[in-house]
Image: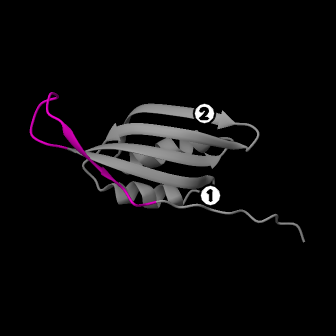
Amino acid sequence: MRFHAEIVARNEDGVLERILRVCRHRGFGPSSFYAVASPLENTVHIEIHGSSQRPHTLLVKQLEKLYEVLTVVVNTRETQGVGPSLESRARPAQVRRTVYASSGHG
């Protein structure tokens, strides 16, 4: 099953490595990875395309455990039949999480 993950995380040292490690350890093989940092918001927007036989909810739950991760959205594609010429049916995931940080002063 193909997957497409969109992740927004805090732009901290090692965050990209931790996200890729979670994907790899949970059996989600990334085939492409794209990340753009937003210095004004101190965040990084990440897109990962890949494949796995495991349910996408496993990946979402594990990524949500990372402190730096703010939002996770995963879409999956199940291939109909065999061969690249056949169309895929997209099934969007309803998993979305937003974390609001408090000021911490006081």
Q: Say which quadrant the N terminus sits in.
A: top left
Q: Answer above or below: position of 71 versus 35.
A: below
Q: Position of residue 86 (x, y in %)?
A: 14, 33
The residue closer to the viewer here, 80 or 20, is: 80
Q: Answer above or below: position of 1 versus 106.
A: above
Residue at the spot of label 1:
67
Could you tell me the amino acid type at mark 2? Val
Q: Position of residue 48 (x, y in %)?
A: 44, 38
Q: Say which quadrant the C terminus sits in.
A: bottom right
Graded by Cα atoms within 10 Å as few (under 14), some (14 to 19) or many (20 or more), the crowding at tag 1 reads few
Q: Residue at x 60, y 55 (%)?
A: 70
Q: Would you say 52 lies left or right of 34 here?
A: left
How far apart marks 1 and 2 lie (CA) works out to: 19 Å
Q: Is residue 11 visible?
A: no
Residue at the spot of label 2:
36
The residue closer to the viewer here, 28 or 83, is: 83
Q: Secondary structure at mark 1?
A: loop
Magenta span of residues: 79-95
Q: Residue at x 53, y 61 (%)?
A: 97
> Residue 86 in magenta?
yes
Could you tell me the amino acid type at mark 1? Tyr
Q: Is residue 82 visible?
A: yes
